[in-house]
Amino acid sequence: MRAMRLTQPDGGRPGEWLTPANVDPPQLTDDDVIIRVSVCGVCRTDLDLVEGRLRASHYPLIPGHQIVGDIAAVGSLVRDRREGDRVGIAWINHACGECRWCRRGEENLCPYFRATGCDADGGYAEYAAAPAAFTYAIPPALDSDHAAPLLCAGAIGWRSLRLTELRDGDPLGLTGFGASAHLVLQLARHRHPNSPIYVFARSAGERAFARELGAAWAGDTTDRPPAPMAAIIDTTPAWKPIVEALPHLMPGGRLVINAIRKTNADRDELARIDYPTSLWMEREIKSVANVTRADVREMLDAAADMSIAPTIDVLPLENANEALARLRAGAAIRGATVLRVAEPSGRHVRDFPDKNTSNSAR
């Protein structure tokens, strides 16, 4: 099958990290399904992987964790998925189900958490495998192209907004305005219609885009917003936006960091944090770690019910390096980028090469 593979982290120049390859399709195991990939969203976490900030469990690796496609093969123990079903695969690929965090519904914190496109090969390929229990039916109201970014950018945005504990009418801030933030803004406007939303972004294009989607105000990272905010969600890879945002929190306000890794390029900015103006008065900082299956299902349902859709740019799979390079350069991308792998096949699922083979060895 065709795939774009990462041979080693940070092993190539920007725009040359991934190598086109013809590889064997994934092996079908008893509790897995294999998906013929239609599209796979491009996430900043993919950039963290190729640049080495996030280490994979194995190399070569096929990245990609915002996958939508049709089921091509079903393991012998799977009962609730059928060939031809349109499903998604998200970042969460496995959790143990037995630890204290799983029992409390916090499987994102499970010590045995496995991630798609990091601990298991992902969707920058024609086929991808996942445990059936960690796949998601895509609501009919959502087309595959627009559903893909909801599986991570949307789901992590959903979790971030919930962790703010925002009340309707409370001002909300967003630092950065990319794939996740432009979905958070739409969610917040539906769930908290009386809350003004202030957006901080370096790019004039991003600020204009935020206003188009209903932001009450949009300014540069260092600009002063119209009023203090009850909560701020940071979606950037840098430290400066956090340092600049903290003094604009209300007493008792919460900054939620929606990022799996931060770059080291501007880490010195942290030395500018001033305790009396940035943290005192019970301001707090909370990180977001991964997503749960519930986050993904709830985001998909909310998007279908509220007609929330990402703005997307679609590129062919072979342009994965270009998509990542644009993300790294901070190029003006409105919303999210999606890689087209194959056209959705509907009921006519192409035969998977090993679909009659089921192997219990994982």
Image: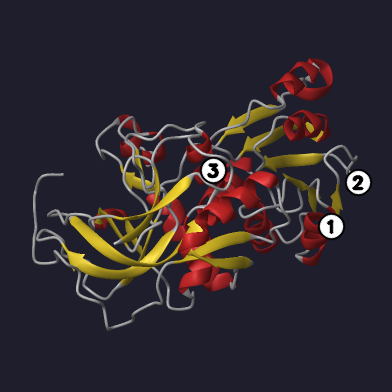
What type is the residue that disc 3 sits on?
A: Leu
Are the two marked residues, 3 and 1, in contact with CB atoms closer than 8 angstroms?
Answer: no
| Residue 156 relative to residue 333: left or right | left
In the image shown, does 96 or 326 lie closer to the viewer?
A: 326
List x then y, in percent, for residue 154. 55, 56
Rendered view: 35 above or below 307: above
Are the two marked residues, 1 and 2, in contact with CB atoms closer than 8 angstroms?
Answer: yes
- CA separation in Å, label 3 and label 1: 31 Å
Q: Which residue is mark 2?
A: 226
In the image shown, does 167 or 293 lie closer to the viewer?
A: 293
| Residue 110 relative to residue 282: left or right | left
**In the orientation shown, which residue stands out farthest toward the bottom?**
347
List x then y, in percent, for residue 249. 79, 34
In the picture, which quadrant includes the N terminus? bottom left
In the picture, which quadrant includes the C terminus? top left
In the image shown, does 271 or 190 lie closer to the viewer?
A: 271
The answer to whether any part of residue 191 appears in the image is: no
Q: Which residue is mark 1?
A: 216
Mark 1 vs mark 2: which is more N-terminal?
Answer: 1
What type is the residue that disc 2 sits on?
A: Pro
Crowd rating for badge 3 (residues with CA inside 10 Å; few <14, some 14–19, many 20+): many
- CA separation in Å, label 1 and label 2: 9 Å
Task: Residue 47: give its label.
Answer: 3
At 63% from the left and 42% from the top, the residue drawn is: 164
List x then y, in percent, for residue 351. 19, 74
At 88% from the left and 43% from the top, the residue drawn is: 225
In the image shown, does 125 or 81 lie closer to the viewer?
A: 125
The answer to whether any part of residue 313 appears in the image is: yes
Task: Residue 54: give its label.
Answer: none
Q: Which image quadrant for residue 230? A: top right
Secondary element at tag 3: helix
List x then y, in percent, for residue 299. 50, 59
